[in-house]
Amino acid sequence: ERERERERNMPTLTKLFTMQEASQHNTKEDCWIVIDGKVYDVSSYLDEHPGGDDVILAETGKDATDEFEDAGHSKSARELMEDFCIGELEPSSPAIPELEIFSKKEPTEIAQKLVDLTKKYYGIPVTIVGISMVISFLYLRMKSRNSNFSFCMIRRIVRKYE
């Protein structure tokens, strides 16, 4: 009993992986998952997994601890899992692979293209709005001047065919 306790408390030499390394193994032929800071190569187990391989494949590239715990795995499943352990997650490794961060002062490529297009073709929308305003103004002016005239013309046409 004491020997087992001592073995558990002794540091073990295991291979260390970053989350980025683990996330690159995300196919059915080469599948690694990370649970409780340990890295598991479960490629050979995918077809045998009772929940199906898609459940495991969906958890590659991120920490799958919560999903593993939520599934309510048995003690025997946890023991079986140890056969697939290939190392541990590097303590300094971020849980999520780093994302590229852009400064607000540096325009992104898409934003820069939009600005360039706006500068190049700004005249088109301005022209369309201007023409629309002129047509609206002329229509309202004509309508207010000829409203009585239009009504009289319609009345004459209706009487003619009565």
Image (tube, rainbow, N blue to C red):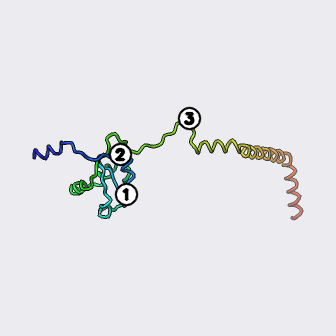
Q: Residue at x 87, y 50 (%)?
A: 149
User: What residue is drawn where x is 76% and y is 43%?
Assistant: 130
Disc 2 marks which amino acid?
A: Thr
**CA distance separating discs 3 and 1:** 38 Å
Q: What's the CA distance linking mark 3 and mark 2? A: 31 Å
Residue 2 appears left or right of 79? left
Q: CA distance from mark 1 to mark 2?
A: 18 Å
* Residue count near mark 2 (Cα–Cα under 10 Å), binned few <14, some 14–19, many ≥20: some
Say which quarter of the image contains residue 129.
top right
Q: Determine whether, in the image, residue 84 is placed left or right of residue 101.
A: left
Q: Going 54% across and 36% down the picture, which residue do you hit?
A: 104
Crowdedness of circle 3 by 10 Å Cα count: few (<14), some, many (20+)? Answer: few
Cβ atoms at labels 3 and 1 below 8 Å apart: no
Instruction: Say few, some or many: other residues with alpha carbon within 10 Å of mark 1 (under 14 / 14 to 19 / 20 or more).
Output: some
Secondary structure type for disc 1: helix
Which quadrant of the structure image shows residue 16? top left
Q: What's the mark number on residue 105?
A: 3
Q: Name the amino acid, label 1.
A: Leu
| Residue type for callout 3 | Lys
Q: Can you identify the residue that label 1 sits on? A: 57
Q: Which mark is residue 18?
A: 2
Q: Is residue 12 left or right of residue 35?
A: left
- Residue in the foreground of this view, choosing between 153 and 3: 3
Which mark lies nearer to you, 1 or 2? 2
Give the vertical position of 8 relative to 27 (above or below): above
**Nearest the camera: 144 or 98?**
98
Residue occupying the far left of the picture? 1
Element under label 2? loop
Q: Residue 27 location, x and y as percent?
A: 39, 58
